[in-house]
Image (cartoon, helix red, strand yellow):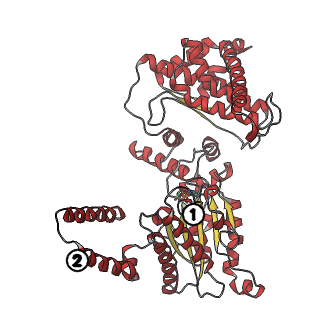
Amino acid sequence: MKNYLEYGIGAGVGILIFLTYNGVDILPIIFILLIGGLFIYANPRTASRSYEFSGNNGGERGMGLSFDQIGGQETAKSELKEALDFVNDREKIKTLGIRPLKGILLNGPPGTGKTLLAKAAANYTGSVFLAASGAEFIEMYVGVGAQRIRRLFAQAIELAQKQNKTSAVIFIDEIDVLGAKRGNGNNNTEHDQTLNELLVQMDGLKIDMQIHVLVIGATNRSDLLDPALLRPGRFDRQVKVDLPDKMGRLSILRIHSQNKPISPEVDYEELAENTFGFSGAQLESVMNEAAIVAFREEQPQIITRHLRQAIDKVILGEKVDRIPARQEKLRIAIHEAGHAVIGELLQPGSVAAIHVSSRSNALGYVRQTQKNEIYLFTLPDLENKISIALAGFAAEELCLGDCSTGATNDFKQAAGLAKQIIISGMSNLGIISPDDLPKEQLHEELSVILAAQRQITLDRLQNVKRKLEEIANYLVEYEYMSGQQLREFMSNDEWKSDIA
Ligand code: ATP
């Protein structure tokens, strides 16, 4: 809609230039357009009709959404509730002279439940809920964004009055789009005015106002925000909303299984282990995709296999028809077998599945699980991770005599880990100041670490080359091997004597 308006204005200007070029007097037309434009711009009723923010009591889906319906995020929930108690206890904070809470910033990766938390916050405080996205305020024309900010705050108060509520929650998603640091780039007048207007509106929120307005912003780039937004009196509460840990994943999976017929054989603990690194949105998607698989197979219940297929689909995307030539398939199989064998050797029990089939996001993939969350890594941990990352490349080198472009992402991952070794003071360079380390020296040390791990990985694989090829041949044939099958392959005596 906004784009059509901009195209229309562009076309209008073009027509005016054309008329002038042909000698037509366009002054009267400009005069009429100016009067019309001024009327639309200045009239709040027309403006509000042209741009309304989505608002209701907690959102349609969020109607009555409570914190209990949000899985995990225990720290975020308790920090948020603590802050919201100020909104609920207005009289007390007035007598103590505490300044009202105006803004809370939810900071975390996409799909972790920031919108849900904002809706639950509105419900917890009995407030009306209005949602907008930062991008809705960024326009080409100076003043439009600022006008929308004014409209948003006015609409929040109107809505609260209409519904006899004493508070309103305004949720601004992707607030970094509208609240990015001022003064960067060339033409920032519109952006600066919009941000200024947000600051002005937040400063205008007073304790004695009939309706308490609370602004909840969400971002995954709080480092981009203008410091003025973060100073006390504006967004002075910051709540971290992280990817869920195992317990969090377990509770999110349970929440999203409530409306689905799940077979009693499904082990939720195992499911939570197999979805390490997933966001709440991805976990919701796993449950949904599993239900779709069950539907396609005309099964009355969702079983473990459906859930495994769903996990793979969420990570790798849909299967595609592209069929690699046999030689290419063998290379992919060798590459993935390399990752899996070294992964299982260095972190026993960690491989969940190996895939060699074209998906929209990958040609092959080894899915690993993690029993416990790990937050700290020692030098051997990081070196092992590098070895696992380089194992695909090393397996290709060992079995085929050359390598392919398939290892590019593995190199990036391995280099990232090697960098972590250097900046943590665990390399030959000792403790360093990362900012002052010359690029050449960093590169040199990275190369030393990676070359050493490449050689170690090659030696490890050399010992089990015959088995590696057997696993790869199996993958060429069947395109899939479960972690259990891999462990059976690896636990037989022949294998043990190979790696001894
Ligand atoms: P974005 O940053 O991309 O806007 P977000 O952090 O606001 O994402 P939400 O929109 O709140 O994420 O979550 C998207 C969906 O993911 C929800 O509708 C819900 O189905 C699911 N979800 C995410 N986190 C949780 C959670 N903690 N508990 C239950 N469901 C969750």
* Residue 366 drawn at (x, y percent): 57, 31
Report crowding for label 2: few under 14, some 14 to 19, many 20 or more residues within 10 A (C-alpha): few
- Identify the residue at the far front of this view: 23
**Which quadrant of the figure contains the N terminus?**
bottom left
Q: Is residue 184 above or below residue 118?
A: above
Instruction: Quickly name the residue at label 2.
Output: 28
Total number of numbered labels?
Answer: 2
Label 2: element kind? helix
455 left or right, relative to 379: left
Report crowding for label 1: few under 14, some 14 to 19, many 20 or more residues within 10 A (C-alpha): many
Q: Is residue 429 above or below residue 147?
A: above
Kindly identify which numbered label has been placed on residue 41. Answer: none
Q: CA distance from mark 1 to mark 2?
A: 40 Å
- Identify the residue at the far right of this view: 430
**As shown in the figure, which amino acid type bears the numbered disc 2?**
Pro
Kindly identify which numbered label has been placed on residue 179. Answer: 1
Q: Give the mark toward the camera: 1 or 2.
A: 2
Q: Earlier in the sequence, mark 1 or mark 2?
A: 2
* Residue 177 drawn at (x, y percent): 53, 59
Label 1: element kind? helix
Q: Nearer the viewer, residue 382 or 75?
A: 382
Please say whether residue 322 is visible from this viewpoint: yes
**Which quadrant of the figure contains the C terminus?**
top right
* Residue 318 drawn at (x, y percent): 43, 39
